Image (cartoon, coloured by chain):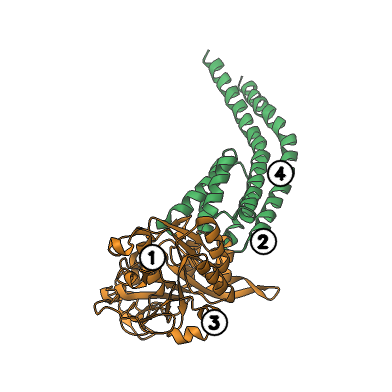
Chain colours: A green, B orange
Amino acid sequence: MLKWIGASLILLAGTAFGFLQASRYERRPKELRHLGNALLTLETEIVYGVSPLPEAMSRIASSVPKPVSLLFADASARMRETAAERTAADSWSEAIHAVWPRLSLADSEKASLLALAPTLGLTDRDDQAKHLRLAAAQLRTEEETAREEQRRYEKMWKSLGALSAALVVILMY
Amino acid sequence: MWKSALEWLPSSIRTALAHLPANWMNRAEEIRIRIDRPLEVVAAGEYTFVTPDGRLTLSAEQAFKPAREDCAKLLDRVTNHSFYTMEEELRRGYITVRGGHRIGIAGRAVLENGRVRTLQQIGGFNIRIAREVRGSAEQLLPLLWDPVREAFHHTLIVSPPQRGKTTLLRDAARAVASGGWSSPERGGRPRKVGIVDERSEIAACVDGRPTFDVGPRTDVLDACPKAEGMMMLIRSMSPEVLIVDELGREEDAEAVLEAAHAGIAVMATAHGRGPDDVRERPSLAPLFAERVFTRIVTLAPRGPTGTILDIRDASGERIAVPERTSIAWRL
């Protein structure tokens, strides 16, 4: 009886682990797309709307889905907090570090987002647009590879988790 | 006013300035910040450097020297983290912030087709502290009232820079629009006032609301070129009194003429040491040829800010000023 309970626990854990890994592969391209779109919206807000960053970012936060929206909401909140004397660059990089654990993105994407910080809000509109478009383009290429990986590994992880758990159970028997 | 100007500064600079002696705080007209050079305060023609602990000094070595990061923070703050929203302001060279303070900016100019497009590498700031002196125009207004026409004289306030022109003009707007500046039989009822505030100095609008009290019946056309703005206001807001700062271009003179002929009282200011200076400026000559301004108020170049030197009529005759009319405001 005890054996049965143990075996089913192992099976359950293995399957769950497999699905968790698979869901990372599923979420990554989605988040990349949302992030890319958000950056392009930010470009529009800056170039055509000429809205100040705190407003532009909170508007974006309400228009893109979670968890990408958290990044913009956090940065906007940090900028509005005047007593802390954060510059736009400080707010943006702090927001990235704070929100990162909730995103399923890789370090290379973090780097291209952080690369925006030194110029964010500090140059004229054309220059802002250039940087944002560059970052969005980088995310787009990442998105392609992420999709490729999703096709390849998502199903694999889903079955691999359950199968390796089954193997452990068989070996223990 | 000093306090609300300090709010814009990063804490390092603010701590140094927070301990300044009261007589400097009250009189301060400008705070000057330059990267790696002494922090300076200007008041009533005098200047002083400030040490890190807020003492006054004239030695550049002992003075507090704002670092590059301090200036970056200041710039980030006054542009609301968004340098790109300030393109027009940077082309003019200054940003007006909440509280009406005007922050002049110096840096490296970026040209486009030979004209300044924007500034980069900002290295110098001049914070001109705005002063609102309520009541400063109240004794002056009865002298500008024409009992025959039952309207205000077209008035030109002439003074050198930093002598209180704008402060006086602002309070005139407030007093005219709130009424009660004189006894009722002399026409003290509130008037409709229109302000063309090209440099956002008179009303200091932020998000469409004046941050200074310019009166309940006042409409402000903010950041609008004067000549065009005057015509717009006349068409759209039908003011009884039109207020503009610093006439200087030919089209300004034309617009003032237009307004005067439309029966609107114009109150304006101009840079100059006296009426003769202004009379000789080619751009304003048509106004004097037509004898538009029937009251020319000159502010004294020395003494307390806002002291009236004399008031003249269109032909240059002095108007008798009652003995006690001294609008030099106590700070």
Q: For the residue marked with disc 1, what is the amino acid?
A: Glu
Q: Is residue A76 above or below residue A23?
A: below
Residues tagged 3 and 4 counted as in contact (Cβ below 8 A)? no
The mark closer to the camera, 1 or 4, is 1
Local secondary structure at mark 4: helix
In the picture, the quarter occupied by the N terminus of chain B is bottom left
Circle 2 sits on which residue?
A126
Tag 4, which chain? A
Q: Which residue is mark 1?
A: B150
Question: Mark on residue A143?
Answer: 4
Residue A35 image-quadrant placement: top right
The x and y percentages for residue B41 are 37, 77
Q: Residues within 10 Å of mark 1 (few under 14, many from 20)?
A: few
Q: Secondary structure at mark 3?
A: helix
Residue A93 appears in the figure: no
Question: What is the distance, in whole Å, between disc 2 and disc 1 at their CAs?
Answer: 55 Å
Q: In the rendered view of the protein, which quadrant contains the C terminus of chain B?
A: bottom left
Q: CA distance from mark 1 to mark 4?
A: 75 Å
Q: Amino acid at mark 4?
A: Glu
Q: Is any atom of residue A81 visible in this view?
A: yes
The local secondary structure at tag 2 comes to helix
Residue at mark 2 shares a chain with residue at mark 1: no
How far apart marks 3 and 4 lie (CA) works out to 68 Å
